[in-house]
């Protein structure tokens, strides 16, 4: 029987090692989703604070607490925007809400607004705020419910969230644009996704405007002033 040579073993120092793999670049989409999920409750808190500040004859304690909440929410908003800028990796700037372009003292048109969002508490607070601004508001907690309400309500504005189950805001906008409606509503995407690419996707889906949560009262009033008259007569 032939002798077999034992397998040669290289000295430890000569063991071939694979070159370490460079870490994969951080995924942007998960981080953008985190920003979106933070903006949603921030929008609800901001709207609630606006409602508190509109109440007349507030006790001193309520005014003090509202002032403290405003400072904290402003700081929280700043941190979220910094996180959004990091998610964009400086390749595209976050799409910010436009500055006011109409006189602050100009009265608001009275519009019929359909507010669409699966977050019922946020929808309730936003509808209360819009009603305080003199608007007629109906709410829908899904895109399908919004489509059901369109013919009878005939809104001037449809303000819709994007990330909703079953049918997204993008799909809702496309469906509305396909409908033969006597009045074509002005479509506003109201979402926590705020990069320029998100704005472009919203416009491509059929939205007329893209707003990033949270939206302050001044920006909301400006939207109603600058876009409301044309929407009401379309």
Image: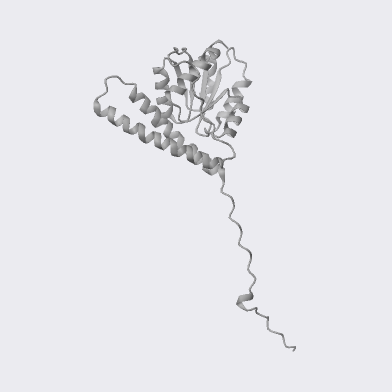
Asked whether residue 155 appears in the rendered view, the answer is no
Looking at the image, residue 5 sits to the left or right of residue 139; the answer is: right
Looking at the image, residue 11 sits to the left or right of residue 125; the answer is: right
Q: Nearer the viewer, residue 86 or 162?
A: 86
Instruction: Point out residue 10 in the picture as x, y percentages from the top left corner.
Output: 65, 78
**Which quadrant of the figure has residue 49?**
top left
Q: Work out whether 35 lies above or below 203.
A: below
Coloring basis for residues = one colour
Q: In what quadrant of the picture does the C terminus appear?
A: top right
State the residue at coordinates (50%, 33%): 192
**Which quadrant of the figure has residue 59?**
top left
Asked whether residue 46 appears in the rendered view, the answer is yes
Instruction: Point out residue 146 in the picture as x, y percentages from the top left corner.
Output: 52, 23
State the residue at coordinates (57%, 26%): 172
Q: Work out whether 178 lies above or below 31.
A: above
Looking at the image, residue 61 sits to the left or right of residue 117; the answer is: left
Q: Nearer the viewer, residue 72 or 181?
A: 72
């Amino acid at each position: 029987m032939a002798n077999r040579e034992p397998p040669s073993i290289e000295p430890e120092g000569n063991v071939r090692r694979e070159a370490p793999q460079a870490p994969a670049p951080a995924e942007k989409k998960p981080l953008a989703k985190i920003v979106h999920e933070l903006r949603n409750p921030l929008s609800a808190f901001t709207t609630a604070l606006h409602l508190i500040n509109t109440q007349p004859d507030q006790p001193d304690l309520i005014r003090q607490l509202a002032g403290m909440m405003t400072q904290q929410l402003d700081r929280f908003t700043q941190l979220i925007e910094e996180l959004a800028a990091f998610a964009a990796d400086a390749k595209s700037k976050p799409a910010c809400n436009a500055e006011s372009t109409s006189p602050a003292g100009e009265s608001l048109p009275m519009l019929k607004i359909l507010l669409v969002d699966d977050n019922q508490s946020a929808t309730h607070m936003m509808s209360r705020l819009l009603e305080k601004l003199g608007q007629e508001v109906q709410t829908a907690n899904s895109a399908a419910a919004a489509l059901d309400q369109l013919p009878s309500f005939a809104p001037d504005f449809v303000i819709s969230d994007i990330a909703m189950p079953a049918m997204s805001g993008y799909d809702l906008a496309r469906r509305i644009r396909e409908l033969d409606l006597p009045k074509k509503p002005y479509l506003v995407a109201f979402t926590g996704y705020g990069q320029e690419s998100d704005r472009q996707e919203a416009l491509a889906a059929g939205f007329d405007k893209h707003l990033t949560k949270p939206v302050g009262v001044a920006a909301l009033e400006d939207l109603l002033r600058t876009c409301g008259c044309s929407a009401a007569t379309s």
